[in-house]
Image (cartoon, rainbow, N blue to C red):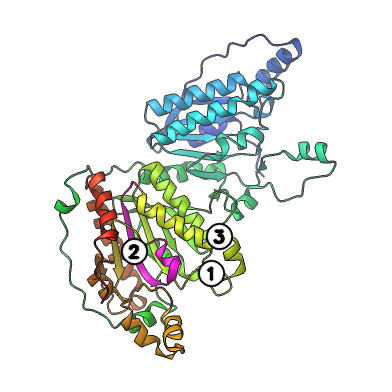
């Protein structure tokens, strides 16, 4: 662990040189007892500040941001009534001025000398942050060593993106309090930044020197202007599309399973820019088999959630934790007003005791509900395999794009064959009969656009991913220019009236 930086030192490190402007006004204390007054005086002398938080604004790589920064030297960064009021005023000002907000808490929690009146102020701070997020403004959090108690359980845990300092002690109940209450030491290695990352609670673990870069990358996505709303969906201009000859469905199934076939990570590497990876559900699950990120496709910003073909194995298939992480992405898109891009590429969701007890069916249903009702523009990319409910969960969107050899089916063709013909040997026949391929999906109104493979994405991964990225950028630009109400009505209509009758 590096030496702890004071609040002003962190500001000087992260913000552009000379750009910080304090919003703080001198604290006027109410009546306090003599002992606490002496504590406050010593704390101010030690920390060089009049409270445990510093607030203000500055720029990061030229981008204007508001900041809330803890000062551990002032009574261990504890939050009393005056500190809470300073935080709330700053959050409300950032909201009024439309500024993204960067919080860097470091605190032992609520100030014990002030008791319950300070404790309940965590509600006040939380309410102000919720109003900031309701305004569609970014809230970014950098958790420093240590951050515990009421601070961790309020404004420390509400970030759209949450990054932690390496080795930081992070948790609800401080280890010293735990030992005093229970007579034994808290287990080592639990309340650490790295363990929280492993459990999907923080998005990254980075030293303070890298904070400016991650904030800049995130804001390049979050602050990219969206196209102005234009004509209703039925009048929106559609780009010319090169027809893609239909492929044999079974050949597509075989192609989609090739080891060399590019997946969502290759798409991000070659077809997108300004990728800011996120991690987990934020609620104690890492979401195995799913990629979640803020991205830009050309000039089109988005939240991307995609099934990672290389991380889904027979030992660790796609489970309910991955869908809960996907739903975190859906919530982020809604809160930030960003388009959502979902990428389907799965051999199927988990069939196991853990998946059943983890609520897999319910997570599929809730994912469907979220996708159908999201207020932001939505685009689905059917990139490869599209098996079962795990694929269906990410399908509903304003537009659906498919790779030439992508497919969608309630079961793998071998499974469908086993049910219908009592043998898996007629899988190719079932793939054709069930209309699983991209061409049939287009004819049936499930897919809107097919991206060609020349002749197989596995043989031209970079070029294929660049083509898909360009299509995604074009589709997002079109969707963002459509009136919101008309676009959402069209989405509902396509799944009620837009699908072709069974053949």
Q: Secondary structure at mark 1?
A: loop
Residue 20 in sight here: no
Q: What's the residue at 61%, 37% (across, down)?
A: 153
- Earlier sequence position, callout 3 versus callout 2: 3
Residue picked out by circle 3: 359
Q: In the image as oriented, which residue stretches furthest toward the right?
A: 183
Q: Pinpoint residue 76: horizontal percent, then vertical percent.
A: 68, 29
Is 155 a magenta residue?
A: no
Q: Nearer the viewer, residue 143 or 353?
A: 353
**Horizontal arrangement in the rendering, residue 393 relative to residue 186 (left or right):** left
Instruction: Kindly indicate whether the residue at mark 2 contacts the one at mark 1 (C-beta within 8 angstroms).
Output: no
Residue picked out by circle 2: 381
Q: Is residue 285 above or below residue 106?
A: below
Q: CA distance from mark 3 to mark 2?
A: 25 Å
Instruction: Kindly indicate whether the residue at mark 2 contacts the one at mark 3 (C-beta within 8 angstroms).
Output: no
Q: What's the residue at 48%, 35% (across, down)?
A: 102
Q: Pinpoint residue 103: horizontal percent, then vertical percent.
A: 52, 34
Q: Secondary structure at mark 3?
A: loop
Q: What's the residue at 28%, 75% (across, down)?
A: 453
Q: Pinpoint residue 432: horizontal percent, then vertical percent.
A: 31, 83
Mark nearest the camera among 3 and 1 is 3
Q: Secondary structure at mark 2?
A: strand
Q: Pinpoint residue 335: horizontal percent, then vertical percent.
A: 41, 42
**Which quadrant is the N terminus positioned in?**
top right
Q: Quadrant of residue 416?
A: bottom left
Tell me the crowding category of disc 1: few under 14, some 14 to 19, or many 20 or more residues within 10 angstroms, Cα based: many
- Earlier sequence position, callout 1 versus callout 2: 1
Magenta-tinted stretch: 375-394
Residue picked out by circle 1: 350
- Earlier sequence position, callout 3 versus callout 1: 1
């Amino acid at each position: 662990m590096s030496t702890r930086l004071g609040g002003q030192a962190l500001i000087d490190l992260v913000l552009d040189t000379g750009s910080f402007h304090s919003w703080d006004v001198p604290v006027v204390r109410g009546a306090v007892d003599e002992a606490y007054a002496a504590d406050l005086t010593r704390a101010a002398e030690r920390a060089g500040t009049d409270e445990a938080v510093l607030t203000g604004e500055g720029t990061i790589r030229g981008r204007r941001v508001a900041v809330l920064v803890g000062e551990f030297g002032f009574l261990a960064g504890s939050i009393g009534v005056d500190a809470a009021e300073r935080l709330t005023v700053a959050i409300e000002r950032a909201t009024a001025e439309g500024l993204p907000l960067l919080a860097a808490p470091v605190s032992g929690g609520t100030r014990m000398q002030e008791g319950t009146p300070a404790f309940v102020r965590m509600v006040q701070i939380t309410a102000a942050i919720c109003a900031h997020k309701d305004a569609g403004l970014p809230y970014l959090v950098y958790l420093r060593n240590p951050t515990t108690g009421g601070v961790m359980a309020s404004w420390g845990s509400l970030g759209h993106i949450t990054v932690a300092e390496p080795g930081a002690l992070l948790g609800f109940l401080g280890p010293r309090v735990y030992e005093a209450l229970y007579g034994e030491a808290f287990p080592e290695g639990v309340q650490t930044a790295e363990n929280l990352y492993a459990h999907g609670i923080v998005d990254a673990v980075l030293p303070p020197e890298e904070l400016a870069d991650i904030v800049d990358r995130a804001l390049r996505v979050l602050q990219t202007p969206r196209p102005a709303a234009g004509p209703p969906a039925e009048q929106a201009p559609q780009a010319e599309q090169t027809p893609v000859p239909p492929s044999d469905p079974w050949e597509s199934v075989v192609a989609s399973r090739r080891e060399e076939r590019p997946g969502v990570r290759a798409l991000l590497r070659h077809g997108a820019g300004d990728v800011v990876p996120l991690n987990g559900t934020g609620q104690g699950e890492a979401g195995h088999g799913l990629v979640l990120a803020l991205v830009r496709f050309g000039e089109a910003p988005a939240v991307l959630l995609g099934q990672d073909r290389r991380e889904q194995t027979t030992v660790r298939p796609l489970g309910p934790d991955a869908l809960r992480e996907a739903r975190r992405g859906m919530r982020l898109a809604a809160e930030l007003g960003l388009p959502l891009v979902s990428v389907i590429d799965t051999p199927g969701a988990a069939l196991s005791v853990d998946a059943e007890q983890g609520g897999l069916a319910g997570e599929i249903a809730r994912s469907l509900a979220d996708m159908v009702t999201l207020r932001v523009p939505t685009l689905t990319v059917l990139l490869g395999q599209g098996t079962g409910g795990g694929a269906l969960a990410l399908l509903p969107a304003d537009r659906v794009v498919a790779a030439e050899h992508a497919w969608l089916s309630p079961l793998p063709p071998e499974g469908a064959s086993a049910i219908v013909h009592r043998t898996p040997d007629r899988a190719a026949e079932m793939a054709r009969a069930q209309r699983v391929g991209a061409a049939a999906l287009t004819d049936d109104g499930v897919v809107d656009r097919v991206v060609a493979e020349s002749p197989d994405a596995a043989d031209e991964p970079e070029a294929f991913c660049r083509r898909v990225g360009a299509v995604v950028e074009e589709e997002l630009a079109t969707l963002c220019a459509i009136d919101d109400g008309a676009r959402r009505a069209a989405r509902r209509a396509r799944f009620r009236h837009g699908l072709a009758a069974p053949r």
